[in-house]
Image (tube, rainbow, N blue to C red):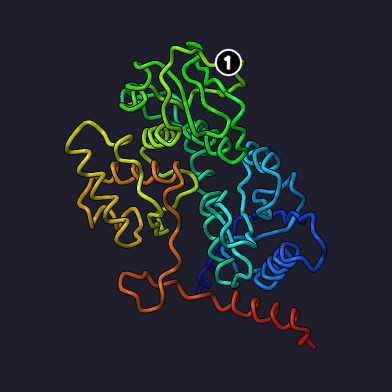
Amino acid sequence: MNAAPAHSPAVRSERRIALIQPAAAAEDRAALAIKLLDSVLWVFKGTTQSNWTICPAESAHVIVVHQDQPAGHIAQWRKDGKLIVVINTDATASAISPHALTYPFQAVQVLRVLEQVDAELESRASVGRAGSAATGNNQFDGRGDAHGSDAWDFVDSLRTLRLVNSAETWFVGKGSSGSVLWVRGDGSRYCCDSATVRAIRSGKRHLSGLTLQKAAAVPAELNSGSGSELAWFAGYHASTALAPWLTERDRYRLTRWPDLGRVQPDDPSLRAAQMRVLATLDAAPATAAQLCVRTQVAPEVVTRTLNALASCELMEPAPMAAAGEAGTRSSPPVPASRLRQFLQNMRRHLGLSS
């Protein structure tokens, strides 16, 4: 009688992470925060969903920096496609990444951030695989929705401008037909003609194909608008799928309402749908799927509204729900092999191993 075939263990992704040492004394809070993260990674080695290996920044998927890391370095790493995790030692510091830890942090908080960046890396890989297999990749459809990995390029450029915060510089967004709009170096203002404003609001002028270049001057005859308005519509019309740094499983909470006078659509039914999404998200954290159920709004509108909020940095991941909280999803049991690995790592870390 033939033996039943053994089940192959699930293949775990290999993730590389770089811990950038701050320019601080060894006992400074910034340096201690990096040391703490290093220890947590060591203790949990072999127990997480993916294998995390510490490496130099050049070969890393994820880069961990202190909040005082020069903005130019972060902008270049983002341009190279790396995800940024920021460690804050000042709880009042401005958020410069959706993935952040505030020192002193707990191990469970580190695991949650690792899960978030892991999901974003997997989402990027899935988009890349789908883009490679699809025909007509990076083409625009009639609604102005982009397909492929370039859909978020312009939104990422706006996020980088807000990070670099160079208000004295202007950039021009150029497409195949020439100059389309101008954006101030801190992302706070933009300029274009009236027809382009209407096209951006309606989604007929898709922005993902634009590249930003330094501009010598801004034409005086152009209309000026708020950079948050530009970011809202760029994010709203970028894709019918969640932004790469958002996940289906995370709950999000509203941190600030958008300026509705600037970003509300002309269509009354769409305006009402967006208002229901905003009010519901303001009342309690929710996933995209939960928002669809609670608001009875079409998934595409919910997704696009979440993308717009994220592009304007008006929402953030909510903390994990407490055990027993209504609506909290149960976590899958930890495999025994991972639990044993964790306990062995902990004993070695505490110097208890024989």
x, y (%) of residue 146?
A: 41, 29
The residue closer to the viewer here, 310 or 150, is 310
- Report which residue position mark 1 lands on: 217
Residue 28 screen position, x and y as percent: 77, 65
Q: Residues within 10 Å of mark 1 (few under 14, many from 20)?
A: few
Query: SS at mark 1?
Result: loop
* Viewer-side residue, 290 vs 87: 87
Q: In the rendered image, is residue 132 in sight? A: no
Q: Would residue 208 be found to the left or right of residue 26 on screen?
A: left
Q: In the rendered structure, which amino acid carries the disc numbered 1?
A: Ala
Q: Is residue 80 above or below residue 44?
A: above
236 over 287 or under it: above or below: above
Q: Give the farthest residue toward the right.
A: 25
Residue 154 appearing in the image:
yes
Q: Residue at x 70, y 49 (%)?
A: 69
Seen in the image, is 3 located left or right of residue 351? Answer: left
Q: Where is residue 281 in the image (x, y as percent from the top left)?
A: 32, 56
The total of numbered circles placed on residues is 1
In the figure, is residue 7 to the left or right of 221? right
